[in-house]
Image (tube, helix red, strand yellow):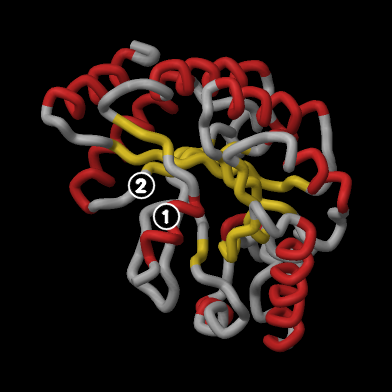
Amino acid sequence: MTEKLLLDTLDDFASRNAIADLWLRDDDATQPSSALDRLLDLSERFSIPMTVAVIPEPTDEALAKRLEQTPHIDVAVHGWAHQNHAGPEEKKRELGLHRPLETVLGELRAGLEKLDSLHEPRFVPLLVPPWNRIDETIIKHLSAAGYQALSVYGPEKPGKIPLLNTHVDVIDWRGNRGGKDHDLLFAETAARMCDAHDTGGMTGILTHHLDHDESVWDFLQTLFTLTADHPGCRWRSSRQWLEALSP
């Protein structure tokens, strides 16, 4: 099967003059690295816009200088320090109520201001919570803290702030912690494209450059080859999506 299901889905979209919107989010950037270079080069080669979720606390100008060399890159806020504050029996979470609310919101404001200063031309006020987890109480305060949207993992649900989620994670976190089987990834992508078309949403691909094995790189190469110029889909940036929210 491999990529045939996805290609058939794309061809079906094109035959109906329909277009599936895709977007790409990569998590956990702090500094330049060979893995990040490889992903940026792949993105540039196929002209795929990418949102890089940067961890504000440890990052500095070195990453900003690297990202400015690649077109079609947006920078989102990946929490503050990607530090777990949950208890040993809980799922990892930085943006929970294990600390005073104002402490968490203060970090989120600081992260937004720091990345806006470092990456001003590329910065988007989009929050990507570490581990894709955030308490509902914190969500209620995001707009006042300067954020326009939130990005987690899974189907979007109505809430206090617009959601631009990811839906296909390339890593098998519960298994070998390497790349998922390609048949599964293409099937997940095709299924989400169909669901998103019915609801008017996007299909978000989630990568983690520091954790990629060769299977992931091969999948991305094939995915970009199939989709970069196919009339049944288009890659969009988070910036384009945010701009469409404005009246």
Is 156 placed left or right of 27 in the picture? left
The reply to whether callout 2 and callout 1 are in contact (CB within 8 Å) is yes
- Residue occupied by mark 2: 202
> In the rendering, at what x and y percent does residue 88 appear?
75, 64
- Vertical placement of residue 3 versus 134, above or below: above
- Name the amino acid type tagged 1: Trp
> In the rendering, at what x and y percent does residue 140 appear?
50, 83
Does dot 1 land on a helix, a strand or a loop? helix
Can residue 87 be seen by looking at this rendering? no
> In the rendering, at what x and y percent does residue 48 appear?
52, 32
Instruction: Report the Cα–Cα distance between label 2 and label 1.
Output: 9 Å
- Name the amino acid type tagged 2: Met
Does dot 2 land on a helix, a strand or a loop? loop
Instruction: Choose top left, top right, bottom left or bottom right for residue 245.
Output: bottom left
Instruction: Choose top left, top right, bottom left or bottom right for residue 60.
Output: bottom right
Structural crowding at the residue carrying mark 1, measured as other residues with C-alpha within 10 Å and reported as few (<14), some (14–19) or many (≥20) = some
- Residue occupied by mark 1: 241
**Residue extending farthest left:** 16
Q: Earlier in the sequence, mark 2 or mark 1?
A: 2
